[in-house]
Image: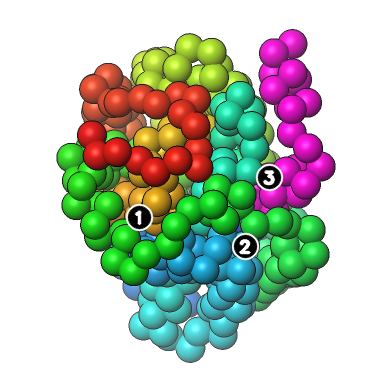
Amino acid sequence: MAIFDDLKLITRPQWNVVIASYLGWTLDAFDFFILVFVLGDIAKEFNVANSVVADTLFWTLFMRPFGAFIFGWAADRWGRRPTLMVNVMLYSVVEFLCGFAPSLTVLLVLRAIYGVAMGGEWGVGASLTMESIPARSRGIVSGILQAGYPSGYLLAGILFGTLHHVLGWRGMFMVGILPALLVLYIRSKVEESPSWEQMEKKKGQFWQTFKAHWPLAVFVILLMTAFNAFSHGTQDLYPSLFLKGQHNFSDATVGTIAVVYNIGAILGGLTFGSISQRVGRKWAIIAAGILTLPIIPLWAFSKSPFMLGLGAFLIQFFVQGAWGIVPAHLNELSPAEVRATFPGFTYQLGNLFASKNGNIQAGLAERWENNVGLSLAVTVAIISVALIIITAFSPEKRGVKFGEKSAPP
């Protein structure tokens, strides 16, 4: 099969890079999604509405562009490998400290700092990976890398379903210190990007390059706004406010459904990432967006755990299927001189513009007599159509050679 042929091209040192970047995004997402499972617990402890606690999601997403710029600039200036190590250590320590927050205000501040670290990881890890592997392998590796996001969500779901009753919400945050161990693997096994080592580094390079490519930057930010609303709109409120809050499912049931739909997400990312290598990045994204639409009623309006689990599996298969293409697509579109900064910065600016998504969905649900399912269905349907339309006008540079200076469009 072609997918295995693409994987055979990857050498052992290159696999070390893929594994490290995948684990970095997995553990980053694990730390982020712990919050979505315990959002209701935090609201009860601090005696506030769920929509107020949802501000912690907003502040994390809001701060991610700052992290993408800071860590991306550092990676373009001093290298992908050392920057990734600092990044992983930062988000692990801050996650641990969240377990000691004495008030909601302190928790909000810590989640904002965590957002800086989370914002930096994706761009640095994706550039390091895509610059280190053969061009023919980008599609499937893009799916592998992006599968780290639902993999982290899956781990958070397992932790919630098995140990939440023992650890409580504070203990779950404290478990978030474990990703710091990944730094040891990166230090001992991962080599620097060969493309970065060949690239001439200049002060002010980001702003010069960004100015030269500003139409592309604006379009990618718009695209990533739709993408982030697509992802967070189907994930952030689903376990806590929908499955547990609206349906009153047990922790074990919520955790099981979360595991099921994240398996779907992982399989979707791998499938569509691989497909995109054959049919093109934009058409694979459009296909995933179209296939999401008929699944929405099953996902949002079913009653039984089985049917909800089936709907969640399918919708995440397509949502994260589209996302599985993003690491390759954005890195191929990016100007070579700022490949660690440009994809991550534009991606996280999209996150910023979509950062009120959780608040909007929670607010609509409260307005509609706490009908979270209706809120999710309406917003995700609108977002899906928007993503399809925007992607249809997307440029594409599938298979572009890395390591060469980019010319302005």
The residue that disc 2 covers is: 81
Q: Quadrant of residue 200?
A: bottom left
**Callout 1 crowding tier (Cα within 10 Å): few <14, some 14–19, many ≥20:** many
Helix, strand or loop at disc 2? Answer: helix
Residue 122 image position (x, y, % from top left): 50, 53
Crowd around label 2: few <14 · some 14–19 · many ≥20 (10 Å): many
Please, is residue 199 above or below residue 92 in the view? above
Tell me the chief SS of the magenta region.
helix
Corner quadrant of residue 189: bottom right
Q: CA distance from mark 3 to mark 2?
A: 12 Å
Determine which residue is flagged by label 1. 345
| Residue 358, placed above or below residue 256 | below
Question: x, y (%) of residue 58?
Answer: 33, 62
Q: Would you identify the image quadrant in which residue 176 lies? A: bottom right
- In this orientation, does residue 289 appear? no
Number of numbered callouts drawn: 3
> Badges 3 and 2: C-beta atoms under 8 Å apart?
no
Mark 3 touches mark 1? (CB < 8 Å): no
**Would you say 144 lies left or right of 406 here?**
right
Between disc 3 and disc 1, whose residue precedes?
Answer: 3
Q: Amino acid at mark 1?
A: Phe
Residue 12 sits inside the magenta stretch:
yes
Q: If you read the primary sequence from the N terminus, does the residue marked by circle 1 or circle 2 appear first?
A: 2
Residue wearing tag 3? 18
Tell me, for residue 383, which label it has, or none.
none
* Magenta-span inclusion, residue 106: no
